[in-house]
Image (cartoon, rainbow, N blue to C red):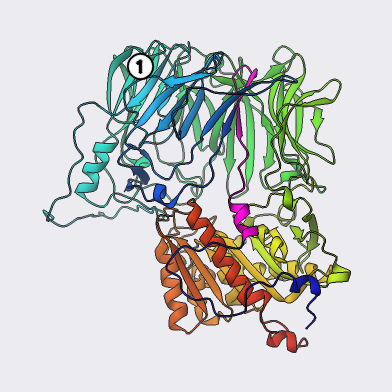
């Protein structure tokens, strides 16, 4: 077999069996450098669009940080020392920069030593920024004075961030915050009993209660006691003058939101009975409205335990849901209720109704609009509302124009489209702050027009846009669209009167930076200058390629080739395919492009792209559509379509002369791992596979998985056929399994990889299982990530790059076994 001098230059490891390891390993320097590349700061824009907050991100945390204590309670994972989320990402620096040409950034002073900053929120007036900082044994609330560029701790009270979300809310006048705190008299955590007092009992008296495979659920009385302890929250008002005002609001508080006029507080609290079947989001929920001083005004609802929600995408609990404040009114609540019993499979002409309830909340709620599909949210404008509904089976999304001052009046459908049809996606409304912490739909022409921004998917790739649409006629005017050689995304409308917008612009070789663009003269002024994270890889070749599946479905991938590589001179390379399957109801939608040739060449350590530095032709994000049109469900032909997709990308690489078809690996994470195992079981297209944090036995997720709505008992043959575990005997290629030992993702229990490996081992297959301590579904510790890269590199080097010619390569007239 031909091996080019170019490929030989990359041969580092000998092709020997990969041995077991009991210590963390480090990959070659070129790959390690990608892991340690400095991350680009994130940017948060002030409500008045006058300031940018640049938030620096640290490199990957140490394994010691991930080894901090962790409790899994009712679907949440918390650090019992801090009373906040475990494994959370944070920022380690803050800087301010005006949104104007030539302005310099200034570092924020006064930050704590070794900061772990989270929950960054601007005050409605833009003068301050509140954020939390994680200490070793507590979470503190900090305040940044924007004009002074100075930060300091606001209160000595410990923040309770166990419930998730933001554990504080700004008052509309920007002079105080409602803060979730750890009660001062809470006491010590309950200790586990030395011996159980009895069995853990669950029962069901003939009622259907299907549930997906959630993780970290409560398992017994001690878990219930721990949940009540750590989620016990007292809501207090903390002024910018550091005064603390108790409000008498305490309990298992999940949310406390001030009304737009600041006179009321909407509070949601969980209570018993708890569940061992579903997470806290479905626990009984008492919803109350309080005065600004904490006095109870009205109980809105007390919702029961929601264990019996029907299966199917779009099925919902009955009763009040999606509750919030109407953003354009002083103190009006809105919510939705199901009209179809919450069952998306039930035949119904009307599925949801949205209600309004004005202060003082003791009257009857007023119906605002009745929807034919499932409610999908509302965006409030000045004197109008945009109400969304959707339906999974048809992939339809609708947007209705509603007059909130004429409840019950017939709405007008403004937009209707398939969310699968990215080429015709109209975009999302541009929102702007009203100065009281509420975001409204931005308008022009005396409220007659709104603005839409979107990715602008097209056959030429994504070209983000900004459009204006007339609410009366529906006619649109394109104000901006990204043009080659740039990929330029609309971040915010800075001043619609002055027709200036903030954009994020990049090219294939230039990293993203922020620009101030004038729509009238089409000039863009650069505001930030973030450096190239890995300039040594600037010459790596990147190309978006398009090709067809055997049945004519258009496909695409991003092809990466090593710097200086020439196919005619150097010959075909070993290949590495990285993908993630996606279901579609339309073949046309499945064939649409989802990328841009002008986006920056990210060489993240997470996927397959780094191996371009090791001499591979990398096919990143290779399209793996699974199409089921009409009455057919996509998964009815999952295996056949998966193999056809893989065959197509390999054929395209061979056609281009860049790929040696006898030396190709396939890999993916999560559902991509599931894909990888299936491709090895049902085809002989690949020499090896790498499957990270996957699920391999679908009978362990019997009430649905990914986009599959049918239960195991409704479609047992589908569950069987799609489960790699059931076909482990057909795997003829080496497979590397990597899994986070603390994976909390629904369905991908670590047991999935353990059981699959045991099956492969029992059948005498070539397999390796690597369990990463303390890691969840995504891997975060530097030691874990470096070891992951080392494992992948050794596996590819041994079983792909240096693999001996296969029997199929020796007998090219013999077709590949597709497993059909």
Residue 150 at least partly seen: yes
Q: Quadrant of the N terminus?
A: bottom right
Tell me if residue 761 comes above or below residue 253 in the rendering: below
Q: Is residue 730 above or below residue 595?
A: below
Q: Is 799 displayed left or right of 89 in the figure?
A: right
Count how many numbered circles sit on residues in the image: 1
How far across and down, in percent of the image, does residue 249 sit? Answer: 28, 22
Does 36 appear in magenta? yes
Quadrant housing residue 722? bottom right
| Residue 570, placed above or below residue 35 | below
Q: Residue at x 71, y 46 (%)?
A: 421
SS at circle 1: strand
Q: Does 466 lie within the magenta span?
A: no
The residue indicated by pointer 1 is 237
The quarter of the rendered structure image containing the C terminus is bottom right
* Extent of the magenta region: 29-53
On the rendered structure, is 443 left or right of 290?
Answer: right
> Looking at the picture, how far across and down is residue 364, in whole percent?
39, 19
Q: Does residue 57 appear left or right of residue 519 in this picture?
A: left
Looking at the image, which is closer to me, 501 or 396?
A: 501
Please provide percent x and percent y for residue 593: 75, 51
Q: Is residue 556 visible?
A: no
Is 52 positioned to the left or the right of 549 in the image? left
Q: Nearer the viewer, residue 276 or 106?
A: 106
Residue at 51% x, 45% y: name it. 314
């Amino acid at each position: 077999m031909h091996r080019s001098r170019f490929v030989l230059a990359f041969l580092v490891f000998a092709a020997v069996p990969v041995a077991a390891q009991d210590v963390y390993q480090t990959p070659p320097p070129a790959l390690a450098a990608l892991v340690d590349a400095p991350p680009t700061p994130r940017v948060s824009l002030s409500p008045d669009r006058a300031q940018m907050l640049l938030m620096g991100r640290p490199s990957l945390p140490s394994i010691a940080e991930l080894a901090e204590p962790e409790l899994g309670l009712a679907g949440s994972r918390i650090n019992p020392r801090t009373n906040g989320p475990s494994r959370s990402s944070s920022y380690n620096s803050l800087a301010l920069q005006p949104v104007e040409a030539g302005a310099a950034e200034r570092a924020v002073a006064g930050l704590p030593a070794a900061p772990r900053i989270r929950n960054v929120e601007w005050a409605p007036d833009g003068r301050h920024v509140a954020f939390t900082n994680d200490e070793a044994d507590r979470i503190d609330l900090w305040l940044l004075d924007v004009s002074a560029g100075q930060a300091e701790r606001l209160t000595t009270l410990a923040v309770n961030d166990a419930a998730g979300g933001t554990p504080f809310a700004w008052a509309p006048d920007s002079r105080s915050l409602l803060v979730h705190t750890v009660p001062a008299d809470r006491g010590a955590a309950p200790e586990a009993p030395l011996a159980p007092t009895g069995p853990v009992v669950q029962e069901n008296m003939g009622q259907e209660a299907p549930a997906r495979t959630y993780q970290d659920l409560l398992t017994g009385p001690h878990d219930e006691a721990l949940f009540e302890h750590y989620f016990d929250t007292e809501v207090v008002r903390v002024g910018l003058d550091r005064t603390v005002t108790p409000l008498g609001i305490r309990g298992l508080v999940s949310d406390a939101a001030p009304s737009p006029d600041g006179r009321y507080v909407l509070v949601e609290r969980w209570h018993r009975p708890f569940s061992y079947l579903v997470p806290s989001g479905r626990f009984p929920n008492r919803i109350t409205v309080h005065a600004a001083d904490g006095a109870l005004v009205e109980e809105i609802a007390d919702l029961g335990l929601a264990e019996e929600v029907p299966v199917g995408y779009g099925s919902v609990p009955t009763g009040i849901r999606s509750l919030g404040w109407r953003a354009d009114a002083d103190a009006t609540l809105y919510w939705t209720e199901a009209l179809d019993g919450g069952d998306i499979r039930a035949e119904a002409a009307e599925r949801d109704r949205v209600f309004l309830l004005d202060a003082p909340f003791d009257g009857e709620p007023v119906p605002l609009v009745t929807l034919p599909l499932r409610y999908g949210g509302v965006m409030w404008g000045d004197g109008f509302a945009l109400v969304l509904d959707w339906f999974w089976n048809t992939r339809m999304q609708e947007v209705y124009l509603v007059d909130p001052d004429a409840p019950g009046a017939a709405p007008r459908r403004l937009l209707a489209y398939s969310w699968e049809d990215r080429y015709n996606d109209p975009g999302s409304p541009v929102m702007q702050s009203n100065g009281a912490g509420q975001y409204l739909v931005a308008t022009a022409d005396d409220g007659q027009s709104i603005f839409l921004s979107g990715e602008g998917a097209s056959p030429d790739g994504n070209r983000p846009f900004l459009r204006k649409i007339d609410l009366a006629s529906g006619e649109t005017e394109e104000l901006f669209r990204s043009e080659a050689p740039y990929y330029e995304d609309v971040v915010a409308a800075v001043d619609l009167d002055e027709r200036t917008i903030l954009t994020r612009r990049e090219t294939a070789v230039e990293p993203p930076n922020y620009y101030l663009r004038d729509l009238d003269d089409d000039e863009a002024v650069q505001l930030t200058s973030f450096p190239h994270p890995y300039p040594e890889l600037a010459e790596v070749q990147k190309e978006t390629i398009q090709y067809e599946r055997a049945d004519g479905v258009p496909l695409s991938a991003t092809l990466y080739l090593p710097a200086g590589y020439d196919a005619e001179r150097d010959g075909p390379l070993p290949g590495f395919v990285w993908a993630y399957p996606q279901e579609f109801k339309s073949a046309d939608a499945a064939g649409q492009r989802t990328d841009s040739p002008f986006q920056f060449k990210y060489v993240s350590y997470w996927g397959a792209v780094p191996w371009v530095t090791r001499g591979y032709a990398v096919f990143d994000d290779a399209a793996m559509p699974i199409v089921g049109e009409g009455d057919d469900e996509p998964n009815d032909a999952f295996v056949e379509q998966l193999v056809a997709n893989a065959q197509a990308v390999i054929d395209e690489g061979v056609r281009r002369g860049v790929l040696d078809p006898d030396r190709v690996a396939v890999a993916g994470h999560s559902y991509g791992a599931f894909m990888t195992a299936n491709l090895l079981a049902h085809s002989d297209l690949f020499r090896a596979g790498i499957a990270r944090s996957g699920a391999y036995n679908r009978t362990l997720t019997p009430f649905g998985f990914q986009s599959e709505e049918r239960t195991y008992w409704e479609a047992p043959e589908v569950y069987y056929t799609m489960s790699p575990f059931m076909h482990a005997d057909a795997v003829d290629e080496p497979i590397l399994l990597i899994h986070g030992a603390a994976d909390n993702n629904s369905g991908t229990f670590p047991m999935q990889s353990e059981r699959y490996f045991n099956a492969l081992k029992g059948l005498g297959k070539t397999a390796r299982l690597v369990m990463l301590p303390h890691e969840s579904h995504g891997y975060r510790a530097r030691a874990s990530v470096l070891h992951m890269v080392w494992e992948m590199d050794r596996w590819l080097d041994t079983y792909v790059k240096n693999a001996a010619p296969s029997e199929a390569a020796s007998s090219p007239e013999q077709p590949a076994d597709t497993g059909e």
